[in-house]
Image: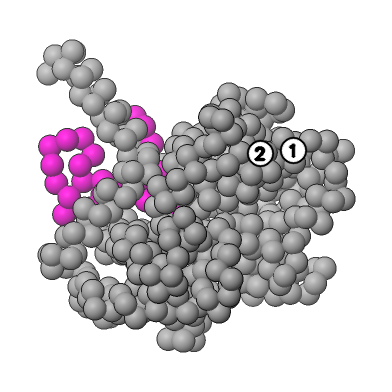
Amino acid sequence: MTEASAQTDDAAARAAAEALLTAAAVKERTAALFAHIEAGRSDHFRFEPAALPAIAATVAELTRSRFPDLQVPLHSRWRHFEGGGRDRFASLAAARGWQNAAEAARAMGDLAIVSVLLDAGAGPLWRYTEAVTGDVAGRSEGLGLASFAMFASGAFSAVPADPLRADAAGLETLTAEEFAAGFQLGPDNPLEGAEGRRLLLADLAGAIRERPDLFAREDDPRPGGLIDALAAEAVDGTLPAASILALVLEGLGPIWPSRLELGGVPLGDTWRHPALTGDAPGSDLVPFHKLSTWLSLSLIEPLAAHGIEVSELDALPGPAEYRNGGLFVDGGALILRDPAAGATPHTVDEPLIVEWRAATVTLLSRLAPMVREALGVGADELPLAALLEGGTWLAGRQMAQARRADGSPPIAIVSDGTVF
């Protein structure tokens, strides 16, 4: 191979990698892998389309019961800060009194980014007790309350005079003991992937220091500086949702554990599957970017506080996670060819899990128009992000609780705290 051809190959690989770091690639590649299942070629799943109408009816009924006026908020981390009908951040904001909207939005960005990065699956045993209310919560709600309480206490800030922020200096000096205390960890209260989560915060500190253009435009390096960078991309006060995910992946991609790379570009939540073939670089890869998508949804409200309207919400894929995925397995649309396979823990790079996640993304897109029709609304009134909240996610959880005593997903997953 000549030097020129090697350079051409490297450029092609980098271009392919950059294409995988987009919302469009998630939708396209997951649809391609789901077509493998739908055609009956999967070794792991069989698709039963006749089950989708009943699932849609369940989601529609749940949505109408929770939101009779069908004014459904977006599925984002902010819903967990409002658990029990308490708007916790509004109380903090009233006490803090930021000088302007941009400053408040930056702090909201700090909280959202740190909290989402800590939001991978907690496991069935861990619980968090909120000191002020005595509320006890596990899983995602508990993680939200714990990270919110740490933010409110100034645990992520290195500025004593301004505790309600997160910054690189505060994140990189957070000790294992402080993390354990904040999440109330102990022998009887284990959190899956706890150390991985803390190290992720340290990696976050390094990443935001490396990109002052994205995270330090108006202040010292801090996660919420990304709100300023996103606002700068808006045109006439409007920003397409896919642009949020693109910048999240660009700025925060380096923090994820070393997995697959293409052309020297880390691909984050992207995995191989042998059913996808081709001559182009990365043709066997399927991107999901689950936590990055969840984070993108959770930055919409900070952007609104800044005065930026987010458009084209349905360009973002549905998150490839186990509650929405469990909805389709427990609901009978995705059937394991080997029923015993669900009880055997699987790592996230196994073809069975890659297929399950791909099916989740594609089936959420197929389910959306069915639910909207049942409710008599359009996509503008009920975008996918609101459908998730309305909700597919809760329906998945309720089905899990009805079928398994610990409410675990129908397929066991080995989590390192950075994917699910």
Q: Which residue is mark 1?
A: 101
* Amino acid marked by disc 1: Ala
Question: In the depicted view, which residue is nearer to us: 91 or 101?
Answer: 101
Question: Height in image: 305 above or below 217?
Answer: below
Expressed as whole percent of the image width and height from the top left, the position of residue 23 reads 38, 44
* Mark 2 in CB contact with mark 1 (< 8 angstroms): yes
For mark 2, give the secondary structure.
Answer: loop
Expressed as whole percent of the image width and height from the top left, the position of residue 210 reads 56, 26
Q: Which residue is mark 2?
A: 307
**Horizontal side, residue 370 vs residue 218: left or right:** left
Question: Height in image: 58 above or below 294?
Answer: below
Question: Height in image: 365 above or below 247?
Answer: below
* Amino acid marked by disc 2: Gly
- Can residue 247 be seen here? The reply is yes
Q: Quadrant of residue 72?
A: bottom right
**Horizontal side, residue 386 vs residue 165: left or right:** left
